[in-house]
Image (cartoon, rainbow, N blue to C red):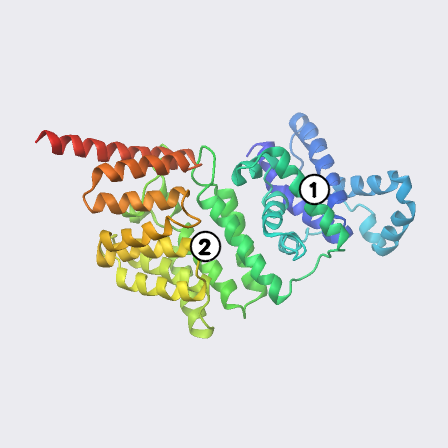
Amino acid sequence: MTVEQLLRTLTPRVLGTLVRRHGDFARCEDAVQEALIDAAGRWAGNGVPEHPLGWLVTVAGRRYVDLVRSDAARERREQAVFDAVPRDELVAAPPDAEPVRDDLLELLFLCCHPALTPPAQMALTLRAVAGLTTGEIAAAFLVPDKTMGQRISRAKLRLKEVGARFEAPTDNALDVVLHVLYLLFNEGYSASAGPVLRRTDLTGQAVRLARELHRRLPGSGEAAGLLALMLLTEARGAARTGPDGALVPLAEQDRSRWDRAAIAEGTDLVTRSLAAHPAGPYQVQAAIAAVHAEAASTGDTDWPQVLALYDVLERLAPNPVTALNRAVALGEVRGPRAALEVVDELGRGVLADHHRLHAVRAHLLERAGDRTAAGEAFRRAASLAGSVPEQRFLLSRAARCTSSEEISGSV
């Protein structure tokens, strides 16, 4: 692992430790950034210290104290901060003199504060918890860097205005935390932009946080459901791309490469959760993923059961994406023409310009034998997709439709 990769991995944990101690998100982030700059310069020349995490926490803590002291206009606040913080935490301990507490989950709760808008919650989570740069977050949201930088700055200012504290979430806030965790996982599983399809650093972080959330809230069926959903989905990750990084669709994946241990854990988790709690959207999605995981091939999949579960999901949490996924299952059960009617209806709504809708439509048209229309739909989907591997996959399918059409025409 390079110094840059190591720093990226450790940054959220260092930030979480400082925010827990001092509560001042903006100033803590400034202190961590200064510590990272110091580490990058020193470690590149002198090598990585024996306890890099402890080193960063110590240096960032000192930088934080320096920042507080240097702000003469806030002298009274400085005194209040010092008075509020236990003295033993203001004195920098030797690196890793004691285990550094993992505060990532509390940091996630803070980023999901109800005073923030959903886009701000997600942006701040990607920045503080996942360690993405402003440019990477801007690319994921398809907005300019400056816009995303302003959004993150406003979010930090808002946390300061409302006096947001480092504490466990309420029941209402838990729904937001679960949603943001799910978005974080999805961004890692299907990157919205860029040269790679998957970002295992993001999926790994999301699974770890979901596991910790489930450990702390064992009575939450949806926390269990979300963890199960992540495990069952990520279990297919290795088979989802070829050696050259190209996308491999579910029907063509080598299922011997699926992570059977993760599938067993996820299946057991969702089975026990559904037996003990009322069904929620994440539990139902996990149950759908479990049905796919149990099948030896796409043809062996219990599609009627998948369709029935999507019917339940639509009643629990109706939204256009769920309806589109249900249309795929409907196509397997009742044929592509029946599914195309649903997709065409969805195409008159908010998904009109979403690449996923055009990709599903293209798939159904190809199955229905209309290769000309399928090729056009695949090209339309490719033009709207942000991920390079997805663009290439969709264009290859468009070329296949054209090739099949030419062969058919020449016979």
Q: Is residue 260 visible?
A: no
Other residues around mark 1 within 10 Å, as few (<14) / some (14–19) / many (≥20): some
217 horizontally vs 310: left or right: right
Q: Is residue 83 visible?
A: yes
Q: Position of residue 17 (x, y in %)?
A: 70, 50
Residue drawn at x 35%, y 64% as measured from the top left: 311
Q: Position of residue 56 (x, y in %)?
A: 70, 40
Q: Position of residue 131 (x, y in %)?
A: 60, 41
318 horizontally vs 337: left or right: right
Camera-nearest residue between 257 and 25: 25
Camera-nearest residue between 106 and 96: 106
Q: Which mark is residue 230?
A: 2
Other residues around mark 2 within 10 Å, as few (<14) / some (14–19) / many (≥20): many
Which dot, 1 or 2, sits closer to the camera? 1
Q: Residue furthest top?
A: 45
Which residue position holds label 1? 153
Q: CA distance from mark 1 to mark 2?
A: 30 Å
- Establish if 167 lies above or below 378: below
**Regarding mark 1 in the picture, which secondary structure is present there?**
helix
Which quadrant is home to the C terminus? top left
Q: Which mark is residue 48?
A: none
**Regarding mark 2 in the picture, which secondary structure is present there?**
helix
Which quadrant is home to the N terminus? top right
Residue drawn at x 91%, y 45% as measured from the top left: 75
Pick whichever of labels 1 and 2 is earlier in the sequence. Answer: 1
User: What amino acid is found at the position of numbered circle 1 in the picture?
Assistant: Ser
Report the label total.
2
Q: Position of residue 138 (x, y in %)?
A: 57, 37
Mark 1–mark 2 CB contact (< 8 Å):
no
User: What amino acid is found at the position of numbered circle 2 in the picture?
Assistant: Met
- Establish if 334 lies above or below 1: below
- Establish if 320 lies above or below 130: below
